[in-house]
């Protein structure tokens, strides 16, 4: 995997990828197996770390991302080996001898595109399956955790890494999911209190303390 | 006119005029922001917006009505848990579908801007530059694109797409200008603006068997000055940030009118948070122990990490 690809994956995991980067990632996903592996590892790490705290998740059977990917590969292989598929394709092409050249021109890229698209769908289905109920979207603590985990095979640096100094732990090393229950609860409370304050009409409540101009 | 006079006039046109009237575009952008302010409050609209914030992706249905000087708004979360937020002016009540797993300490996916966004224009206009970036099309409607860039890299910037006809915010990007990254995205995928929508869309779909709670920011508008002497203070703030009075002596809240951050203090020998630095979308979190204060401070806000760190490092005890 190239350094650029690592950066791209890191940005995506951090939720900071631009639209162009997301498109680039989707394109590279079909070309770079190590990128897929890294992405899958990340998803699995996240699933494993989440499942103990999610009792609802335990009560439902889910395929993990790798199983989905394997399933997808087997289906693709089976489709490739299916003679009826080849015959149907031949039947489709034979009477259209006149148009064979243009059709053939489109067949290969279309097939590649279809494979890449289905692969992406498989990967993203995997993500959905590993987040039962979709509750991670609305839950701060889980969302925070999702940004702080990295696939073991990817040596990416979080945004905070290049800026952190002193004895601060980098969130990547610490992993917010590794915070104990009290830590996670407190962090979530801080985020919520901050967010709610941000939504108030603050201009009516601005205050300047004498001799402490900014406090 | 002599050749010399022509040269002088050309030089004046090239250098003096832009300097004398620098704000033509900026002034127009501000007019658009004012329109946006009015539209956010006073337009009737309904639609579905998506809000991408870090690892969170929310789809919300919104119905907003302005009648007799009162805003009534209904927000319905479309993915995951059924969550509904009813707002009448500044009063927010959150409704959850009754279940064994209701979490009342949840994120409120209301979109990127508070109701005060444009009311605070006067406050934040000195910290940002405003620019126009031509036309676009969002949710099927012609839009005008605006830029809000910080004058210094101690805060983030914005790109806004406003409805050309009404000024309503249709899309926004929260930008780390330095790193050229989009940190948060808000976008209407469908929107209908105007009076002609069904009144019943404002009715709660969770009435009856639901759990409700009131959301509050706990702004202490009636706290007496010096009622409680502060035991700690934030000695450094980015230019233009001011304190918002809050009821809780264990936290401070600051705003430049647009960006905000909060400073929390946990007074105990053993903190529940380790020293760390991370972010959730555009929101940075930095936690550290402070010399002289028995406890740990945590800075949470929509500012770059370097700014949050500098704020955190400036926290000190107040000695009387």
Image (cartoon, coloured by chain):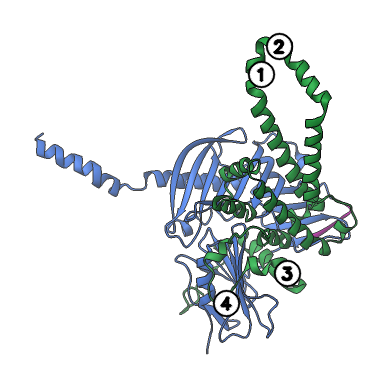
Q: Quadrant of residue A77?
A: top right
The residue marked by circle 2 belongs to what chain?
A
Residue under label 1, please give it: A103
Q: Quadrant of residue A161?
A: bottom right
* Viewer-nearest residue: B154 or A31: A31
Circle 4 is placed at which residue position?
Answer: A167
Chain letter corresponding to the colour green: A
Label ID, residue A96: 2
Q: Which residue is mark 3?
A: A178
Residue visible at 68% across and 75% down? B273
Q: In this picture, which residue range is highlighted in magenta?
A: B207-212
Q: Secondary structure at mark 2?
A: loop
* Res A154 seen here: yes
Instruction: Indicate the chain on which mark 1 is placed.
Output: A
User: CA separation, marks 2 and 4?
Assistant: 71 Å
Q: Is residue B208 part of the magenta span, yes or no? A: yes
């Amino acid at each position: 995997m190239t350094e650029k690809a690592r950066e791209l994956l890191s940005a995506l995991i951090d939720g900071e990828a631009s639209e162009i980067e997301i498109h680039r990632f989707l394109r590279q996903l079909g070309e770079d197996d190590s990128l897929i592996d890294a992405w899958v590892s990340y998803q699995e790490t996240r699933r494993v770390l989440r499942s103990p705290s999610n009792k609802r998740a335990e009560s439902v059977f889910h395929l993990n991302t790798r199983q989905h990917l394997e399933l997808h590969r087997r289906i693709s292989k089976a489709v490739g080996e299916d003679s009826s598929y080849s015959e149907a394709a031949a039947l489709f092409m034979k009477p259209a001898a006149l148009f064979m050249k243009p059709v053939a021109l489109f067949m290969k890229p279309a097939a590649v595109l279809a494979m890449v698209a289905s692969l992406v769908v498989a990967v993203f289905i995997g993500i959905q399956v590993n987040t039962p109920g979709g509750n991670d979207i609305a839950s701060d603590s889980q969302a925070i955790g999702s940004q702080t985990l990295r696939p073991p095979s990817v040596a990416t640096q979080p945004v905070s890494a290049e800026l952190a100094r002193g004895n601060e732990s980098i969130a990547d090393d610490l992993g917010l999911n590794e915070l104990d229950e009290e830590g996670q609860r407190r962090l979530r409370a801080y985020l919520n209190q901050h967010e709610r304050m941000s939504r108030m009409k603050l201009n009516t409540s601005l205050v300047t303390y004498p001799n402490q101009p900014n406090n | 006119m002599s050749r010399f006079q022509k040269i002088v006039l050309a030089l004046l046109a090239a250098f003096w005029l832009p300097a004398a009237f620098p704000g033509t575009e900026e002034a127009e952008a501000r007019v658009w922001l004012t329109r946006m302010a009015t539209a956010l409050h006073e337009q009737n609209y309904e639609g579905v917006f998506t809000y991408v914030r870090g690892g969170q992706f929310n789809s919300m249905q919104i119905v907003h009505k302005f009648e007799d000087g009162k805003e009534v708004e209904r927000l319905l979360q479309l993915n995951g848990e059924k969550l509904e937020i009813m707002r009448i002016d500044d009063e927010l009540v959150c409704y959850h579908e009754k279940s064994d797993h209701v979490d009342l300490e949840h994120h409120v996916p209301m979109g990127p801007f508070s109701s005060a966004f444009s009311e605070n224009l006067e406050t934040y206009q000195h910290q940002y530059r405003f620019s126009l970036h031509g036309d676009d099309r969002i949710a099927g409607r012609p839009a005008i694109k605006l830029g809000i860039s910080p004058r210094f890299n101690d805060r983030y910037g914005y790109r806004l797409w406003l409805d050309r006809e009404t000024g309503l915010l249709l899309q926004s990007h929260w930008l780390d200008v330095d790193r050229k990254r989009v940190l948060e995205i808000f976008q209407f995928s469908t929107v209908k603006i105007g009076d002609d929508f069904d009144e019943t869309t404002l009715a709660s779909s969770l009435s009856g068997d639901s759990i409700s709670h009131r959301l509050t920011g706990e702004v202490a508008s009636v706290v007496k000055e010096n009622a409680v002497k502060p035991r700690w203070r934030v000695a450094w703030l980015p230019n233009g940030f001011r304190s918002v009075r809050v009821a809780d002596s264990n936290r401070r809240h600051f705003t430049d009118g647009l960006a905000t951050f909060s400073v929390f203090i946990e007074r105990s020998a053993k903190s529940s948070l380790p020293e760390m630095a991370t972010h959730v979308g555009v929101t940075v979190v930095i936690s550290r122990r402070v010399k002289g204060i028995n406890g740990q401070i945590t800075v949470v806000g929509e500012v770059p990490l370097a700014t949050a760190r500098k704020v955190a490092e400036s926290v000190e005890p107040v000695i009387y």
